[in-house]
Image: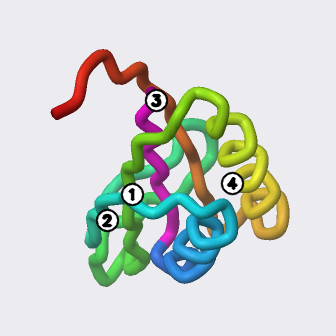
Amino acid sequence: MKAVFIVFNQANTERVEYIFDQLKIRGFTLFEQVQGRGTTDGEPHRGTHTWPEMNSAVITVVDDGRVDELLQTVHKLDCRNKEVGIRAFVWNIERTI
């Protein structure tokens, strides 16, 4: 099992949920009002007057075989609008209850 953590501009919230629906990924946890800045050239998203945009993040746990399809779909969304921004990170899950 893998945990996939996806951070994205709030403008992509419905698109991320649509990706999960299309890939039949049911379980996830959504974090709203996430602040940050992209690694390379991203603008800060702080919810302030100067940096008004905000991010959200979502984490889902999927079987190993589902990760590539999910990452490819996230990458396609990123390529459609690089200025909005979306990133995904994958961790191993050793145990769940």
Query: Identity of the amino acid at label 1?
Result: Val
Kindly report the distance in space between the C-alpha atoms of the residues bearing marks 1 and 4. Answer: 12 Å
Q: Mark 4 and mark 2 in contact? Answer it, CB < 8 Å.
A: no
| Residue linked to disc 4 | 74
Mark 1 or 3, closer to the camera: 3
Quadrant of res 11: bottom right
Kindly report the distance in space between the C-alpha atoms of the residues bearing marks 1 and 3. Answer: 14 Å
| Residue linked to disc 2 | 30
Circle 3 SS class: strand
| Residue linked to disc 3 | 2
Classify residue 43 as left or right of residue 32: right
Circle 4 SS class: helix
Query: Tag 4: Cα neighbours inside 10 Å, few (<14), some, or many (≥20)?
Result: some
Which x, y percent locates residue 13? 50, 77
Which x, y percent locates residue 97? 16, 34
Question: Residue at position x 72%, y 35% from top?
Answer: 68
Range of residues picked out in magenta: 1-9
| Residue linked to disc 1 | 58
Kindly report the distance in space between the C-alpha atoms of the residues bearing marks 2 and 1. Answer: 4 Å
Q: Earlier in the sequence, mark 3 or mark 2?
A: 3
Kindly report the distance in space between the C-alpha atoms of the residues bearing marks 3 and 2. Answer: 17 Å
